[in-house]
Amino acid sequence: MGKKENSVRVFDRIADRYEVIAKFFSFGILPYWFKRLLEGVERGERVLDVACGSGILFGELSKRFKIVIGLDYSLPMLLMAKKKKIARAYLVRGDALKLPFKDETFDAAVVSLGLRHFGDTESSLREIFRVLKKGGTLHILEVGIPQNPFLEKLFLSFLKGVILPIGKL
């Protein structure tokens, strides 16, 4: 099983508790990260939330755009997003490597904590840029391994001891 398929399987299993888990493992700073991500997102007609998951950004995005399209590969995550009942937010099950949209459809796109799950990052980014209008913007929030040696050890221990075992449940 590939990296992408494994990610989808994990998200399918934890969909109903994803937001609680994400807040816990971000030590409560997830809302701050989301706020920072959205600071640079201009207002417009259409925005694409790639790997939208449970639709955690829909509320804020719907304040800035007339139409919010959330795309995710995991059906259980999309069902969680649907429960939010955000006006003008539409859901599409699909793959970031083959976006089911015409060229130059969106004013902006966001990817929040999803890029590492796409399988082929470069191809997925090309695909996102294909559906952005000329002058459209892409906003990405992603985590990585800390540069500080102490924090790196702490992060990797946490990843191996807590995150990975939970993903295997």
Image (spheres, rainbow, N blue to C red):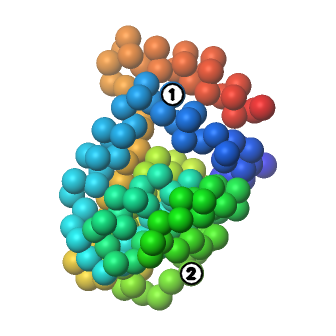
Specify whether 84 is left or right of 107.
Answer: right
Question: Which residue is depicted at the point 57% across and 71% down?
Answer: 91
Position of 88 relative to 103 (above/below): above
Q: Please, what is the three-letter code of the amino acid marked with disc 1?
A: Phe
Question: Distance between the Cα atoms at labels 2 and 1?
Answer: 33 Å
Position of 161 relative to 9 (above/below): above
Q: Residues within 10 Å of mark 1 (few under 14, many from 20)?
A: few
Question: Which residue is depicted at the point 63% across and 55% down?
Answer: 80
Query: Which badge, 2 or 1, is on the more N-terminal residue?
Result: 1
The answer to which image quadrant residue 105 occupies is: bottom left
Q: Residues within 10 Å of mark 2 (few under 14, many from 20)?
A: some
Residue 50 position, x and y percent, is 48, 63
Q: In this orientation, does residue 72 appear?
A: no
Q: Are marks 2 and 1 in contact (CB under 8 Å)?
A: no
Q: Give the labeled residue for mark 2.
A: 100
Question: Tag 2, which secondary structure?
Answer: loop
As drawn, which residue projects farthest toward the bottom?
102
Question: Which residue is depicted at the point 22% across and 77% down?
Answer: 135
Q: Please, what is the three-letter code of the amino acid marked with disc 2?
A: Pro
Question: Tag 1, which secondary structure?
Answer: helix
Position of 16 relative to 164 (above/below): below
Q: Give the labeled residue for mark 1.
A: 24
The answer to which image quadrant residue 73 occupies is: bottom right
Residue 169 position, x and y percent, is 78, 32
Residue 144 position, x and y percent, is 42, 35
